Image: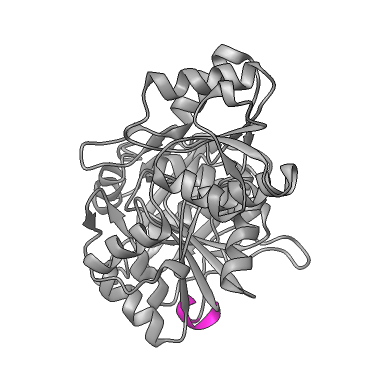
Amino acid sequence: MSAPGATPVPLASGSERPPSTRYDVALLDLDGVVYIGPDAVPGVPAALASARRDGMRLGYVTNNASRTPEEVAAHLTELGVQAAAEDVITSSQAAATVVAELLGPGGRVLPVGGPGVAAALAAAGLTLVTSADDGPDAVVQGYGREVGWAQIAEAVVAVRNGARHVATNADPTVPSPRGPLPGNGALVAVVEGVTGVPPLVTGKPDPAMHAECVRRTGARRPLVVGDRLDTDIEGARRADAASLLVLTGVTGPAQLLAAPPDRRPDLLAPDAAGLLVPHPAVDADGRSWRCGAWNVRVAEGGAGLELSHDGGQSVDGDGLDGLRALCVAHWSAHPDDGAPAHVVGADDRAAGVLAHWGLAGGRG
């Protein structure tokens, strides 16, 4: 445990109660959390239904600006996830709110992206234009699979002529069954690279996105559930909200261990079913850390960490107790910065788990 008065190390406290009974609203990322590509993450629709039965409300939050809330809700319903359009919060909506505040009613905006971008801007009372020659006051750029050279070129000309460049998000990639593919951030970087003008980013992790979520859901004690450290978890930290990282998307154990302080989650689970179960705490005495049947200590000579299993517990919870202990141990040594972790296994079971996590440091 942390010393009295000290800020607890993320993951150290766990949660004695299931998060679905502690928080009023779960703000769930979609890509990599609820679904990957066209398919639901196995077991997640049933888990979310159980969370609702526990009294938790669900908000579906996405930096993917390509679709309208109605389209997203329809997709979720097809996957067996109960959702209405008002349950969906997109980065297009956050961008539209910010731009409407900047420009006022009727401001002229050039949308670049999927249908969700234009729909959100129109709903916010802004005037849409189709060309840089129409004199837009702002360019709002969001993800769209059909975005091509012509739209990017119009954005470049408009920004060069003085339009404010607003990006719904800067995610460099989007998850897919074929692995990460170019996201909105990759194309935003093209416009910035040509014009030399940095964009105003309104999606996660910007607090504007969290404010949009709270405004639309009425959340008083939200829990952000995501798979990305640089958007979901950092966004929660910047908004002073609790967070749950799931490992069904782009983040793996090595990236989690190396995370800087502003990207460290409060809770960790294999998938969104982690909403339904208590989360174990990590006990520490300064030189060793324990979570469940797993122990971590500073390796001989102080060069890294050593993971071991006590061998007396056949059931290992959700399989992540060792990773929780490693994170708390490593982060305790790096309270102000992120750094790669060197880890070795003290026994065959530990070495096998480390190899499975891509942390193969061998036997100590």
Q: Nearer the viewer, residue 300 or 71?
A: 71
Rendered location of residue 203, percent (x, y): 56, 46
Q: Which residues are magenta?
A: 17-23
**Residue 288, above or below 133:** below
Q: Residue at x 55, y 55 (%)?
A: 123
Horizontally, is 152 left or right of 5 in the view?
left
Rendered location of residue 240, percent (x, y): 68, 60
Q: Residue at x 60, y 14 (%)?
A: 195
Q: Nearer the viewer, residue 277 or 342?
A: 277
Horizontally, is 181 left or right of 95 in the view?
left
Rendered location of residue 52, percent (x, y): 40, 82
Horizontally, is 103 left or right of 306 in the view?
right
> Quadrant of the image for the N terminus?
bottom right
> Is residue 211 in view?
yes
Q: Residue at x 60, y 21 (%)?
A: 158
Inspect the magenta stretch and tell me whether residue 19 lies in it: yes
Outermost residue, top side: 194
Rendered location of residue 81, percent (x, y): 29, 71
Q: Residue at x 27, y 69 (%)?
A: 77
